[in-house]
Image (tube, grey):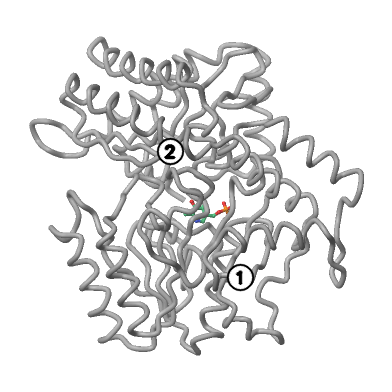
Amino acid sequence: MKQEILKTEGDVNLSEERVIWQEKNCKNKETQRLLEADSKVFLHQAMSSPCLDVLGACSDATIENIHGKKYLDFHGNNVHQVGFSNPYITAQIKKQLEDLSFSTRRFTNKTAINFAEKLVGLLPNDLNRVLFAPGGTSVVSMALKLARVVTGKHKVISYWDSFHGASLDAISAGGEAVFRQHMGPMMPGVIRIPPPMQKGGFFEDEMKSADYLEYVIEKEGEIGAFIAETVRNTDVQIPSKKYWQRIREICTKHGVLLILDEIPIALGRTGKLFAFENFDIEPDIICLGKGLGGGIIPFAAMVCKEEYNVAQDISLGHFTHEKSPLGCAAAHAVIDFIESENLLQKVNEDAKWMKETLDNLRKRHVLIGDIRGVGLLWGIELTNPITQKPATAEAEKIMYNCLELGLSFKVSQGNVLQLSPALTISRNELQQAIEIVEKAFLMLGNE
Ligand SMILES: Cc1ncc(COP(=O)(O)O)c(C=O)c1O
């Protein structure tokens, strides 16, 4: 099959820039041997094998290759809210490992009950029924199934360009066409609407996107759920409070369940424990994952309203690692750590610094078309100042320049540098990272 290089959710691993970077930066024999071994044994797929470098260690805001080169990790697959190898989290996991390492179906365990109670205690009053799963995609799958059971309607609305996981049902519901390519028939009944963007979107006004949602609900009928990320993680799209409140109103009016996918952005990333708290709205179902396992254990959760406890005779998520004691110990430790370290306050202070620093960076580089962010989730959108087109080639070059200088991040939609460090990152490291970004911009002029 012809390999097409497509700009997707992340950077592609087949580009010329990748080859050039590796020739320059991965000369070491051991690294080359391992990269070849990886490429030989793993099934190749987009954004994975063949890989870029070989890791030997990770700690707090940093990952390190097998030869001691450190990268500040501003990507971290969004599992690193509390930093990599957080000693408190690892200690709690080790403790749990010694007590109860697995919970067989049909039995429950104290760690799972305690964490479920803790989690619902942090959410609004009526969000108090929980199901755990080993990953975010599985949680999205459960939420879609639950919405069908509760409403008796199978149709679902999502945004174009959204990502909700990589399984067949999740790519059916998601909006990134590239994930559906060559995949044949999808789950029926998905309707996609243009996402609300405050700048450069399909509608010149984000409220028009809300009106369009209501229009589709009324015209199409039989809509059971609307699934969306509260803040889009990939290219950092942050709707207004007014927008989200209108969406909440529309969903309530039409009996459509509002499923908020906060898998990458909950747990402090936006400066609040849950992103929806920024908008004074409440979802009907919330999906959590990624950093919930402390960056160590694959662990995710769906929380929904008490009144949706109506699927006793159906397996919504028949997962082997459901009430995982290790996952629950990790997740409980994550929440304890966020609370005891006052992490949300730190993130909000960092957010002010990031805004000011990136706004200044923008003044020095005409290629920067937009800066947007919340908490420790920031996007630098690159636009050609003459053509006003996305500066995709430059974005890729800047990313590889940054990697050379010791900073890793993701490029989204081809031209958005997405910056999401560990929330525990020091101000010094943040400063260092922005200096690297600036150097990478300056290197462009010399290429
Ligand atoms: C918004 C969103 N939803 C769902 C998922 C799927 O999570 P997982 O990779 O744990 O299955 C992701 C993963 O990147 C995501 O970003």
Whole-angstrom CA distance, mark 2 to mark 1, is 40 Å
| Secondary structure of the residue carrying numbered label 2 | loop
Q: Nearer the viewer, residue 28 or 136?
A: 136
Q: What is the x, y in percent for residue 230? A: 39, 57
Front residue of 317/293: it is 293
Residue 69 position, x and y percent, is 58, 14
- The numbered disc on residue 257 is none
What's under tag 2, amino acid-wise?
Val
Dot placed on the residue nearer the N-terminal end, 2 or 1: 2
Which residue extends farthest left? 386
On the image, the x and y values in percent for residue 344 come to 49, 40
Residue bearing the label numbered 2: 12
Residue 312 lies, with reference to residue 372, above or below; the image says below
**Three-letter code for the amino acid on which mark 1 is drawn:** Asn
Q: Residues within 10 Å of mark 2 (few under 14, many from 20)?
A: some
Picture quadrant of residue 162: bottom left
142 sits left or right of 13 in the view: right
Q: Residues within 10 Å of mark 1 (few under 14, many from 20)?
A: many
Q: Nearer the viewer, residue 344 or 80?
A: 344
| 250 with respect to 140 (left or right) | left
Q: Which residue is mark 1?
A: 128
Vertical position of residue 300 compared to residue 347: above or below: below
Above or below residue 241? Residue 388 is above
Q: Residue at x 35, y 74 (%)?
A: 191
Q: Secondary structure at mark 1?
A: strand
Q: Residue at x 71, y 87 (%)?
A: 313
Residue at left offset 38%, top offset 16%:
436
